Image (cartoon, grey):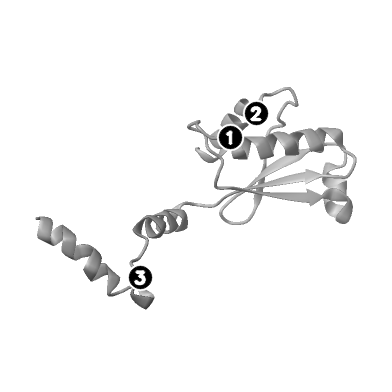
């Protein structure tokens, strides 16, 4: 058994460029990331909106928060300034900040408003639950 295990790295190094051994941990992580569905959110906002700025800060903090089962590390957040698009401005001018989940077909599902008083941990949990359905 020991001979079989010791032969594996040498055999794997034959397939690596320049005689280097492949980083199996990196390969496994890349494969897992490729299989995991992308989790994407859109935040509709505008300059000078203090509620928008507060939510942006909390979303950023929630994405960095580690050590919880509700990790948002793979979350992709896109900010859209409603003043750059007349349609967005018409739809969301009295509603911002508006958070939307991007569905697999590219359409968006508007999420319920998050209270500015929520803790970062609760925001993380609520966002996670949207993608865990």
In the rendered image, the vertical position of residue 14 relative to residue 108, given as above or below: below
Disc 2 crowd rating (10 Å Cα; few below 14, some 14-19, many 20+) is: some
Look at mark 1 in the image and give the residue it sits on. 65
Front-most of 113 and 28? Answer: 28
Disc 3 crowd rating (10 Å Cα; few below 14, some 14-19, many 20+) is: few
Q: Name the element at disc 2.
A: helix
**Quadrant including the N terminus:** bottom left
**First reached walking from the N terminus: tag 1 or tag 3:** 3
In the rendered image, the vertical position of residue 113 relative to residue 81, given as above or below: above
Residue 90 relative to residue 100: left or right: right
Distance, label 3 to label 2, CA atoms, is 43 Å
Distance, label 1 to label 2, CA atoms, is 8 Å
- Counting from the top left corner in percent of width and height, residue 112 is at 69, 32
Residue, x 87% and y 48% (percent of image)? 89
Look at mark 3 in the image and give the residue it sits on. 20
Which of label 1 and label 3 is nearer to you? 3
- Counting from the top left corner in percent of width and height, residue 52 is at 80, 37
Distance, label 1 to label 3, CA atoms, is 35 Å
Q: Residue furthest bottom?
A: 18
Q: Name the element at disc 1.
A: loop
């Amino acid at each position: 058994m020991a001979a079989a295990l010791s032969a594996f790295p040498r055999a794997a190094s034959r397939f690596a460029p320049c005689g280097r051994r492949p980083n199996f941990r990196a390969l496994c992580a890349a494969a897992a990331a490729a299989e995991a569905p992308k989790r994407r959110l859109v935040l509709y906002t505008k300059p000078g909106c203090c509620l928008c700025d507060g939510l942006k800060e909390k979303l950023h903090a929630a994405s960095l928060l580690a050590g919880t089962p509700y990790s948002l590390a793979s979350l992709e957040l896109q900010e859209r300034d409603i003043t750059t698009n007349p349609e967005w401005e018409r739809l969301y001018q009295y509603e911002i900040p508006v958070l939307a989940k991007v569905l697999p077909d590219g359409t968006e599902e508007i999420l319920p408003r998050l209270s500015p008083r929520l803790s970062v941990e609760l925001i993380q949990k609520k966002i996670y639950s949207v993608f865990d359905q």
